[in-house]
Amino acid sequence: MAHAPKTPIPRSPIPAPRRMATYRQRMRAAGLRPIQIWVPDSRDPAFAEKCRQQALAIAAGDPAGDELMDFVDNLYEWPED
């Protein structure tokens, strides 16, 4: 005798806050904890300039500074001023 396939019982979607709470509980049960960190936005045009200024400051105080700056210049294509 053939059986008709079972039709899945329609479920209403679980609200996002409840899904996140469940997820956080699972993560904590696994021994993890949430953290939030803020990092510099490397997409900001001022970021590349700040990195360059800091690299120049380091190179100025380092006897191998010229070699270091050549290395950095060869790694990154600096925007034209």
Image (cartoon, rainbow, N blue to C red):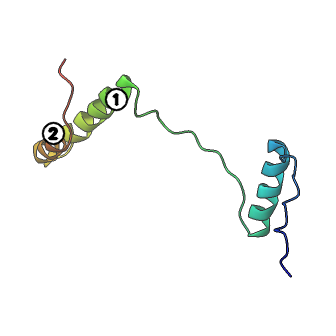
Q: Which image quarter holds the N terminus?
A: bottom right
Give percent across and percent down for residue 34.
70, 53
For the point 32% across and 34% down, which residue is it?
Answer: 51
Q: Which mark is residue 69?
A: none
Q: Determine whether, in the image, residue 32 is placed left or right of residue 45.
A: right
Look at mark 2 in the image and give the residue it sits on: 73
For the point 11% across and 47% down, which residue is it?
Answer: 67
Q: Nearer the viewer, residue 30 or 58?
A: 30
Look at mark 1 in the image and give the residue it sits on: 50
Give percent across and percent down for residue 65.
15, 44
Furthest residue in direction bottom, as rendered: 1
Name the secondary structure under disc 1: helix
Quadrant of residue 32 in the image?
A: bottom right
Furthest residue in direction top, as rendered: 81
What amino acid type is highlighted by mark number 2? Answer: Asp
Q: Earlier in the sequence, mark 2 or mark 1?
A: 1
Q: Determine whether, in the image, residue 57 is placed left or right of residue 68.
A: right
Q: CA distance from mark 2 to mark 1?
A: 15 Å
Q: Nearer the viewer, residue 59 or 51?
A: 51
Q: Determine whether, in the image, residue 14 is placed left or right of residue 58.
A: right
Name the secondary structure under disc 2: helix
For the point 87% across and 52% down, which residue is it?
Answer: 10
For label 1, the crowd category at 10 Å Cα-Cα, with few meaning under 14, some 14 to 19 and many 20 or more, is few
> In the figure, 74 relative to 22: above or below?
above
Q: Determine whether, in the image, residue 52 is placed left or right of residue 13.
A: left
What amino acid type is highlighted by mark number 1? Answer: Lys
Q: Nearer the viewer, mark 2 or mark 1?
A: 2
For label 2, the crowd category at 10 Å Cα-Cα, with few meaning under 14, some 14 to 19 and many 20 or more, is few
Give percent across and percent down for residue 81.
19, 17
> In the figure, 77 relative to 32: above or below?
above
Quadrant of residue 27 in the image?
A: bottom right
Q: Nearer the viewer, residue 36 or 51?
A: 36
